[in-house]
Image (cartoon, helix red, strand yellow):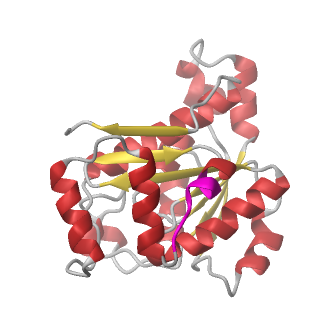
Amino acid sequence: MYEQLFGRNFPLISEEEQRMIKNLKIAIVGLGALSFAAEYLVRMGVENFVLVDGDKVEVVNMNHQKYTLDDIRKNKAKALAESLLKINPEIKVTALPTFLLEQNFDEIWNNYLFNIDIIIDGIDPIPGILVSRKLAQKCKEQNIIYLYPLDLGNGTLVITNAEKFLNLLNGDEPLEMLMKMIQKVVISIPTRNEAIFEKLMKRELEYYPQTVIAAVTASVITAAVVLQIIQEKKVPSIIYCDFTT
């Protein structure tokens, strides 16, 4: 059935590259906006996943995440696994209904992440950027590919290696670290976004607003980077895209 599902990838993707894609082991940690990335990777032919998220699907997720109203109150990892199996019932997917935290990091790493080929970090950066730093450090030490896609309102920032991500982190608390990282790599932040950042810094907003444009853009670029890695192409360390600027 695999050949029927993904035969139309050929010849854009060679038969050897498709075999490599099939055998990839990919973990996605944080399944909000990157729930779309999981779908795109399955449709590309990836068959081995570890999905990690302790959150439940809520109505407020509908505008920028893959889930439907039928998923309300389900755990995101389990709901997404169900969805992916409907696309390709032959995938192997481990759904962990828990957040990756400092307290359980070693347990989850040693049992589920240590032998992964590519880890895609979708942890909510506020306050999770400290855990992301630890995850990136571990990936760097173990030579595991680390991707950090961040949806920014109507755009996205994707950092494609652990060392670059670690070098960009600076600050004393999560919001400061996030803001400094964005300011270092985004050449021209849209005026509207600057106003949002200011409100976040002043704690006038509880969350950073997101649209489906940002979520899908981040996810498409992430899937494209995975393909570029398989095809041994040179991948930029930072990719920034905002169609609304």
On the rendered structure, is 143 left or right of 205? right
Quarter of the C terminus within the rendering? top left
In the rendered view, tell whether residue 70 sits above or below residue 121. Answer: below
Q: Which residue, as the protein is rendered here, is positioned at the far top? A: 11
Q: Nearer the viewer, residue 171 or 44?
A: 171
For residue 16, which quarter of the picture?
top right
Front residue of 6/124: it is: 124
Q: From what the image shows, is residue 6 above or below residue 162? A: above
Q: Position of residue 121 (x, y in %)?
A: 57, 59
Residue 32's spot in the image, x, y percent?
42, 64
Which residue is at 36% across, 62% downward? 67
243 with respect to 101 (left or right): left
- Residue name at image x 24 percent, y 55 percent: 211
Location of residue 167 by image quarter: bottom right
Magenta span of residues: 165-171
Residue 91 at least partly seen: no
The quarter of the picture where residue 23 lies is top right
Marker count (numbered): 0
Q: Nearer the viewer, residue 177 or 114?
A: 177
Give the residue displayed 76% in from the left and 63% down from the top: 138
Q: Quadrant of the N terminus?
A: top right
Above/below status of 83 relative to 242: below
Give percent across and percent down for residue 189.
27, 47
The question of residue 169 being in magenta is answered with yes
In magenta stretch: residue 218:
no
Q: Position of residue 57 (x, y in %)?
A: 37, 74
Front position in the image: 16 or 230? 230
